[in-house]
Image (spheres, coloured by chain):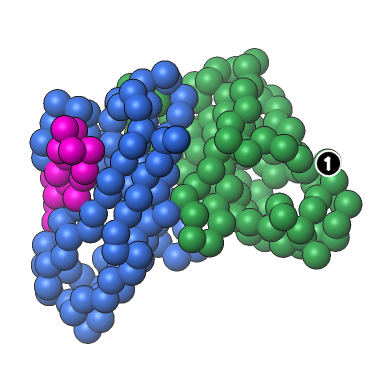
Chain colours: A blue, B green
Amino acid sequence: KNQVEQSPQSLIILEGKNCTLQCNYTVSPFSNLRWYKQDTGRGPVSLTIMTFSENTKSNGRYTATLDADTKQSSLHITASQLSDSASYICVVGDNYGQNFVFGPGTRLSVLP
Amino acid sequence: NAGVTQTPKFQVLKTGQSMTLQCAQDMNHNSMYWYRQDPGMGLRLIYYSASEGTTDKGEVPNGYNVSRLNKREFSLRLESAAPSQTSVYFCASMRGSTSGFYEQYFGPGTRLTVT
């Protein structure tokens, strides 16, 4: 069964610190992997999109990595800010054309 | 350019009532999607439309119907609401298919409670 798992379920860090969120997937055939940020009460917003041939992609203080061999991805947040408090969702797109598999998300809280 | 808009933002229904959730996008996207988001779970696809005039079932279509009215609008109808349909519903749109590398844009969501 196609699945996306994320860890940790929740995370609390202090402002200015770095953190790394993990994503493991079993989606096949794999097409692309996305990370989204979802603020409370809002819809998800895209951070990065990576294909199987890309190892890393950055968007400001967000850097995503992908290891297609081990089917793992990570999202690294540098110098966290209070506005980074949100859920971060890992999503994998298949190669058939219309299926995205969403992970349950990691809830990040950044404290002053 | 409003992106993806959804109405209503909140709705409370009694069991057995019907309602239609509206979604519109102004980005000239081909694909549109309806998802539901429940606590502790990832977004799950209810229905999608790859292009105007076509619709297909997703992972959890039971109890729902959809209409792709035109390229801009994609509505979701609950014919006879059940408490299990209490959820947050998101509409999304995308220029192409999931096998491409287009961004998927989400609306702000509709929070539905069925009592």
Residue nearer the viewer, B9 or A53 = A53
User: Magenta span covers which residues?
Assistant: A57-74
Q: What residue is drawn where x is 72% and y is 55%?
A: B84
Q: Please identify the quadrant where the N terminus of chain A is shown.
A: top left
A61 in magenta: yes
Question: Where does residue A112 sit, x and y in percent of width and height?
Answer: 22, 84
Question: Where does residue B77 sit, x and y in percent of width and height?
Answer: 75, 39
Label 1 crowd bin: few (<14), some (14–19), many (20+), radius 10 Å = some
Amino acid type indicated by mark 1: Glu
Question: Where does residue A4 sit, x and y in percent of width and height?
Answer: 37, 44
Quarter-of-image position of residue A96: top left
Q: Which residue is mark 1?
A: B79
Q: Residue lying furthest bottom in this view?
A: A112
The chief SS type of the magenta part is strand
Q: Secondary structure at mark 1?
A: loop
* Vertical order, B26 against A22 (above or below): above
Tell me which chain the residue with mark 1 is part of: B
Question: Where does residue B31 sit, x and y in percent of width and height?
Answer: 50, 25
* Vertical order, B83 against A30 (above or below): below
* Vertical order, B67 against B7 (above or below): above
